[in-house]
Image (cartoon, grey):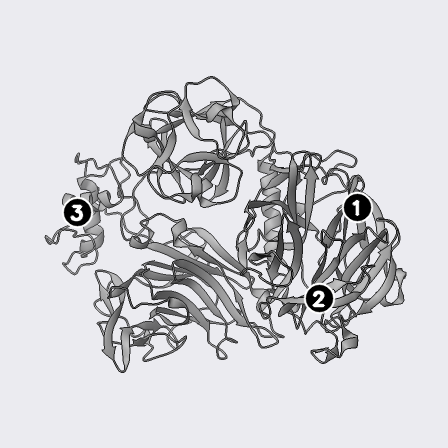
């Protein structure tokens, strides 16, 4: 293996797979803790009841299934699954075939293509074997990507064929598509052909699609009638977009193309596009799944047709290695594609799935679960589905308890404090219709789409009751008009304090075969005060009172010793911090205040920035009177991205106020520019290599604003030095990005975006905390404890150089307009970017 060197393709950047090892450990712990789950059974000959994503699948003999980059084909009564066999080597070891009647229990049928099948297959690399059936010739034809085992520059397609689905395929040979036409692609005849797939249209025509031009373009070819050769170039798709791992399907009158970005072995945001024609009219690329496609890369999409309809099964690989490492772990992610309409496609995540191939359905399956009646405090009625319906769109009502399954619900924890609330009878999810954010938005049941309108948090309000809050709208689950009658509709409504918005969860004994084992994730109603995350109940006596006021005053005044209170806490500007200020701060967070005095704590409670396992190595709390120039410098003038502002070092644009750094963008004529702002950085003053970086800030979000907190490497110019965008905002969305230059000299962006409309309506008016955790293996980017993006540092290795294994300095800036910021012309200025603190920790 030591002689294999891949230098021509982004796949050379594919990493050792530390993220997957960690992921595998997480799943091991999950399997242990969820002991009641129905998991993929590794016992030989035991029937498999469900498939657990992110794990190795086993065949009916109990052996690990090796079917990397594969494809699935329905023929007769069986589904056939073909894929690469990699067991201890990256050289071609064979294409394996498995068959199943139910898509869960797979019988190993053998290696249908072997290194001994042809001289060209000895000591080579073969990827993404895709098999199609030709109904006219009665042949099974396999297309694949072939390389010579020495480098990755051949980029050839290869073909094999067989008269049976699981027999020995005859190898026809490898070639570059259309080489005989004089086409030159990177110094060789014919188009490059790497990641590939096949597709048979409803008229029987066969197609081959593959990545060309160093993975910059996708090319769709029409095949000859025997499917063994290229007939013509049909069209080029998403030229220059660097898409790979293509999967092409047709549903109704629409074609859908699902692809992955070119980030090596590291997972990235999957995307899809649709069109009514293979040639033209393709939509823009649209995100599918989360920003890592649930740490998978598309392999194939197979229709599962049954008595209840047709479901489309997404099959993806979780790669567990890299070139010069072993890609042989064989972990898979299989999920149902959800068509909200002919032009709207979603990929919800289930930890485990159950496939009913006869019915044509795919459902979530995580074993038995404790279920609940959800009881309204005002009426004593329980949450129910109209007429016990199992249909999408059925309205949610309240009704007297009758013990029926339509009145039983279970809670699937999806992380970050949110649940899906799922009806036992229908298996549908509690949903706000049409993703409404308005008061009165109808609450219905709907199949899981993964949308925020189907996610709910529970806030404990005491006495066993909870507020149930929708993630999309931040509104509460509410009984219409405070009705106490059977059949009253349930809706969402802004918090009003009424008992019709309070719900109790009463456990009921029931076994739900398609339900997860989980307890509802609940959040505390304990308030937080403006500068940090510490409770206003500073002495933890259960009430907020004068003791807490004294502690606050001592902490933020006497300890500082400058005789001045922080303006941020003297809310009424009377020169003191007292109960009036506490009440104002508490009201901001909807806190119930007790004014009962309590004993004064003798020693004030200090505000701490300690984090277990981390050592604070540098911070700026911005508590001084001016920006510390020993740590920070200024950018001056126009800098980049066609931005509209001129950066200055004036106090009008950058200053300290009330314990915050304030960067202010203004609309004013200055040095030939119409806007001014500021950008400060630690270049030449402070740098860090690895650690935990934390910033707490309130950012401006009107049109044209482009605030950021980011780092750059100290060696080499951009982009070779590497860029980490820990916080970036523009056009209504937050971003968490990593950028670097690949060996071919192209800029690679590992990007995540999320619209702030997914958060509460007050998000823009609040402070938020951004964190980066960076070590030699990974960069993890968070906002308010939500993991936004994970990047493998190995992916950016270029020879012996890696831009993320060197010191970086940080920048804080507020740009206006430019390439990304949007049009600021209708925005009211000034815009202010408040930073409470910046802290850097390193591992102890």
Front residue of 601/469: it is 469
Residue, disc 2: 194
**Marks 2 and 1 close (CB-CB < 8 Å):** no
Instruction: Report the disc number at residue 785.
Output: none
Where residue 597 appears, as percent x and y from the top left, is 16, 36
Residue 581's disc is 3
Could you classify mark 3 by the number of other residues whose Cα lies within 10 Å: few (under 14), some (14-19), or many (20 or more)?
some
* SS type, badge 1: strand
- How many numbered marks are there? 3
Near-viewer residue (633 or 491): 491
Which residue bears the numbered disc 1?
A: 98
Report the residue at 28% width, 71% height from top. Answer: 628
- Residue 282: tell me if it is visible: yes
Q: What distance separates the C-alpha of mark 2 from that of mark 1? A: 24 Å
Looking at marks 3 and 2 on the same chain, the residue that comes earlier in the sequence is marked by 2
**491 left or right of 267?**
left
**Position in image of residue 10 (x %, y %):** 63, 69
| Location of residue 673 with respect to 559 vertically, above or below | below
Which quadrant does the N terminus fall into? bottom right
Say which quarter of the image contains residue 484: top left
């Amino acid at each position: 293996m030591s002689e294999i060197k891949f230098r021509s393709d982004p796949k050379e950047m594919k990493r050792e797979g530390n993220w997957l090892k960690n992921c595998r450990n997480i799943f091991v712990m999950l399997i242990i803790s969820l002991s009641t789950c129905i998991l993929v059974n590794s016992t030989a000959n035991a029937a498999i009841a469900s498939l657990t994503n992110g794990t190795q699948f086993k065949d009916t003999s109990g052996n690990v299934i090796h079917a990397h980059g594969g494809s699935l084909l329905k023929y007769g009564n069986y589904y056939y699954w073909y894929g690469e066999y990699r067991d201890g080597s990256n050289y071609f070891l064979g294409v394996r075939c498995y068959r199943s009647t139910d898509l869960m229990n797979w019988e190993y049928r053998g290696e249908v293509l072997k290194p001994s099948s042809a001289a060209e297959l000895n000591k080579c690399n073969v990827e993404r074997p895709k098999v199609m059936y030709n109904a006219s010739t009665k042949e099974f034809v396999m297309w694949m990507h072939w390389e010579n085992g020495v480098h990755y520059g051949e980029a050839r397609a290869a073909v094999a064929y067989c008269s049976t689905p699981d027999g020995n395929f005859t190898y026809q040979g490898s070639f570059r598509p259309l080489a005989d036409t004089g086409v030159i692609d990177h110094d060789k005849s014919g188009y490059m052909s790497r990641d590939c797939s096949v597709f048979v249209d409803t008229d029987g025509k066969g197609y081959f699609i593959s990545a060309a031009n160093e993975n910059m373009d996708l090319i769709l070819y029409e095949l000859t009638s025997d499917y063994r050769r290229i007939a013509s170039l049909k069209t080029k798709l998403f030229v220059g977009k660097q898409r790979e791992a293509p999967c092409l399907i047709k549903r109704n009158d629409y074609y859908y193309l699902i692809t992955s970005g070119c980030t090596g072995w590291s997972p990235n945001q999957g995307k899809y596009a649709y069109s009514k024609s293979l040639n033209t009219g393709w939509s823009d690329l649209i995100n599918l799944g989360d920003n890592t496609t649930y740490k998978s890369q598309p392999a194939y999409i197979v229709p599962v047709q049954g008595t209840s309809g047709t479901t489309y099964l997404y099959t993806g690989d979780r790669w567990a290695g890299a070139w010069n490492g072993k890609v042989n772990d064989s972990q898979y992610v299989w999920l149902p594609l959800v068509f909200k309409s002919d032009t709207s496609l979603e990929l919800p995540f289930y930890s485990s799935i159950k496939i009913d191939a006869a019915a044509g359905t795919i459902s979530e399956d995580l074993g038995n679960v404790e279920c609940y009646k959800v009881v309204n405090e005002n009426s004593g009625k329980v949450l129910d589905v109209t007429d016990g319906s199992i249909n999408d769109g059925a309205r949610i009502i309240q009704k007297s308890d009758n013990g029926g399954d339509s009145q039983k619900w279970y809670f699937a924890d999806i992380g970050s404090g949110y649940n899906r609330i799922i009806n036992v009878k229908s298996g549908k999810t509690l949903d706000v219709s049409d993703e409404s954010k308005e008061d009165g938005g109808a609450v219905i049941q709907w199949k899981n789409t993964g949308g925020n309108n189907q996610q709910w948090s529970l806030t404990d309000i005491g006495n066993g009751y909870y507020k149930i809050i929708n993630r999309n709208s931040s509104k509460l689950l509410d009984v219409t008009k405070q009705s106490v009658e059977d059949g009253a509709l349930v809706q969402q409504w802004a918090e009003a304090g009424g008992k019709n918005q309070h719900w109790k969860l009463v456990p009921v004994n029931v076994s739900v075969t398609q339900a997860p084992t989980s307890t509802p994730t609940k959040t505390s109603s304990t308030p937080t005060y403006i500068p940090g995350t510490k409770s206003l109940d500073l002495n933890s006596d259960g009430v907020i009172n004068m003791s807490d006021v004294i502690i606050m005053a001592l902490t933020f005044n006497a300890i500082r010793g400058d005789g001045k209170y922080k303006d941020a806490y003297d809310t009424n500007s009377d020169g003191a911090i007292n109960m009036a200020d506490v009440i104002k701060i508490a009201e901001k967070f909807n806190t119930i205040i007790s004014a009962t005095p309590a004993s004064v704590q003798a020693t004030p409670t200090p505000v701490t920035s300690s984090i277990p396992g981390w050592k604070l190595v540098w911070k700026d709390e911005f508590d001084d009177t001016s920006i510390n120039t020993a740590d920070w410098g200024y950018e001056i003038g126009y800098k980049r991205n066609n931005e509209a502002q001129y950066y200055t070092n004036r106090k009008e644009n950058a200053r300290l106020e009330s314990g915050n750094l304030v960067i202010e963008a203004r609309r004013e004529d200055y040095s030939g520019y119409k806007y001014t702002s500021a950008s400060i950085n630690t270049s030449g003053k402070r740098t860090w290599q690895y650690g935990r970086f934390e910033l707490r800030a309130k950012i401006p979000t009107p049109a044209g604003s482009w605030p950021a907190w980011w780092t750059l490497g100290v060696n080499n110019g951009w982009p070779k030095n590497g860029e980490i965008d820990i916080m970036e905002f523009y056009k209504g969305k937050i971003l968490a990005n990593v950028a670097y230059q690949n060996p071919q000299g192209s800029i690679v962006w590992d990007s995540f975006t999320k619209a702030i409309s997914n958060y509460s309506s007050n998000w823009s008016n609040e402070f938020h905390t951004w964190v980066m955790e960076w070590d030699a293996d990974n960069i993890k980017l968070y906002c308010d404890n939500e993991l936004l993006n994970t990047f493998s540092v190995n992916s950016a290795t270029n020879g012996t150089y890696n831009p993320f294994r060197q010191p970086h300095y940080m920048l804080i800036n507020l740009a206006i307009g430019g390439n990304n910021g949007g049009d600021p012309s209708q925005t009211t200025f000034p815009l202010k970017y408040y930073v409470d603190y910046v802290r850097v920790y390193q591992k102890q």
